[in-house]
């Protein structure tokens, strides 16, 4: 993960395609503001049940933290790492980037992309 690009390209989504069944998914890069504000609803709307369960567990554990500031810090950490984990799992499942522009943007953000184009 490249922390320098965390706030760059805000709002830009990259597309992924599963060549086997033609399924297309998209994801923003960087910090997940929707996860920060809406918690596990963001992964649920993306169809990411594992991510929703993980976010739910972390935020419930954060709710038991002794301090509201500690809870806020944990919520910020979840928002920072959720998109990175989601994109990494899409790539591990065999999804490919939709075009070369998306591939360059994903590489810039520090993801390990095995490109057959080069």
Image (cartoon, rainbow, N blue to C red):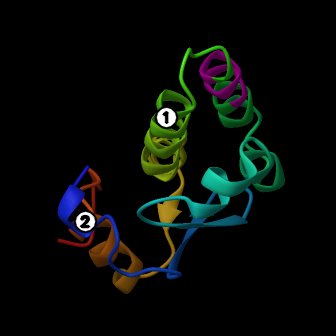
Name the residue nearer the viewer: 48 or 35: 35
Q: Secondary structure at mark 1?
A: helix
Closer to the N terminus: mark 1 or mark 2?
Answer: 1
| Residue 7 locus on image (x, y percent) | 34, 71
* Residue 18 shows in this picture: no
Q: Is residue 103 left or right of residue 91?
A: left
Q: Secondary structure at mark 2?
A: helix
| Residue 9 locus on image (x, y percent) | 38, 81
The residue labelled by disc 2 is 107
Q: Is residue 117 left or right of residue 23?
A: left
Position of 105 relative to 94 (above/below): below
Residue contact at pointers 1 and 2, CB within 8 angstroms: no
Q: What residue is shown at x 55% (from left), y 40% (from top)?
A: 75
Which secondary structure dominates the residues rendered in magenta? helix
| Residue 114 locus on image (x, y percent) | 28, 54
Position of 103 relative to 63 (above/below): below
Q: What residue is shown at x 63% (from left), y 16% (from top)?
A: 61
Q: Is residue 8 left or right of residue 77?
A: left
Q: Which mark is residue 53?
A: none
Name the residue nearer the viewer: 35 or 44: 35
Question: What's drawn in magenta, residue-wise?
Answer: 56-62
Position of 44 relative to 2 (above/below): above
State how far apart marks 1 and 2 are (Cα).
34 Å
User: Which of the two discs, 1 and 2, sits closer to the camera?
Assistant: 1
| Residue 36 locus on image (x, y percent) | 61, 52
Q: What residue is shown at x 22% (from left), y 70% (from top)?
A: 108
Name the residue nearer the viewer: 83 or 21: 83
């Amino acid at each position: 993960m490249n922390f320098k690009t965390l706030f760059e390209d805000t709002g830009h989504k990259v597309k992924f395609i599963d060549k086997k069944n033609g399924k297309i998914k998209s994801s923003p890069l960087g910090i997940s503001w929707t996860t920060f504000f809406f918690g596990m609803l963001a992964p649920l709307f993306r169809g990411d049940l594992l991510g929703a369960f993980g976010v739910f567990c972390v935020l419930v554990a954060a709710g038991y933290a002794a301090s509201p500031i500690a809870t806020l810090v944990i919520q910020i950490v979840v928002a920072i790492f959720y998109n990175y984990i989601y994109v990494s799992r899409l790539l591990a499942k065999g999804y490919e980037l939709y075009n070369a522009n998306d591939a360059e943007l994903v590489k810039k953000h520090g993801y390990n992309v095995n490109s057959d184009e080069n």
